[in-house]
Amino acid sequence: MDAPERYEQLIAFLGSQLPSPVEQEIDADGGRRFTGGDPPEVVVVLTQASVVVSEFRGMWETPLTFVVRPRRVGLIKWRRLPETALWNALGALLKGAQQARLARFQVCQYCDQNTAPEWLHEDRVCLSCAHRQSGAVH
């Protein structure tokens, strides 16, 4: 199988294996960035030579400015691997990144919503409930 065909297969694989919804964008350097989940769970950057799989992470720099800072789980030089090994390795990295992200979610003690860490005011209290319960200002 030639590289352009495998690259197209990688695009299709990522689109089908990432948590829904899957957003795609092209980076300034030509890499294709996939973000899967709502709230986001996994970030993947596909280039002509590699696939980088990351757990979605971010932080509030100010009350109005959220900055995405994915945490790398693994990198695969996809042209070097046989097809079966590539799909197995990529599937394992995607699953691991998603599990790591979801393990950091917490259920809010007031509304019982499973909440992403960037939307928590404190342990087990989401920002919405913190505001309603205590009048917290963000």
Image (spheres, helix red, strand yellow):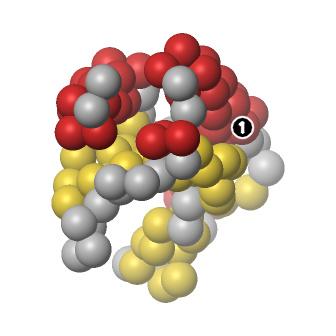
Q: Position of residue 134 (x, y in %)?
A: 64, 59
Looking at the rendered structure, the kind of residue marked 1 is: Ala
Q: Can residue 120 be seen in this view?
A: no
Q: List the single residue furthest toward the front.
A: 2
Q: Where is residue 91 in the image (x, y as percent from the top left)?
A: 56, 22
The residue depicted at 53 percent of the width and 74 percent of the height is: 60
Relative placement, left or right, of 77 versus 17 is right
Q: In what element is the residue under mark 1?
A: helix
Point out the image quarter for the N terminus: top left
Nearer to me, 73 or 38: 73
Q: In which quarter of the image is residue 114?
A: top right
Q: Where is residue 71 in the image (x, y as percent from the top left)?
A: 64, 58
Q: List the single residue furthest toward the bottom.
A: 62
Q: How crowded is mark 1: few (under 14 residues within 10 Å), some or many (20 or more)?
A: some
Nearer to me, 100 or 131: 100
The residue depicted at 53 percent of the width and 83 percent of the height is: 61
**Image position of 31 with respect to 83: above or below:** below
Q: Is residue 100 visible?
A: yes
Relative placement, left or right, of 41 versus 13 is right
Q: List the single residue furthest toward the top.
A: 84
Nearer to me, 72 or 51: 51
The residue depicted at 27 percent of the width and 32 percent of the height is: 2
Residue at the spot of label 1: 100
Q: Where is residue 108 in the image (x, y as percent from the top left)?
A: 66, 36
Nearer to me, 11 or 81: 81
The residue depicted at 68 percent of the width and 48 percent of the height is: 73
**Image position of 58 with respect to 81: above or below:** below
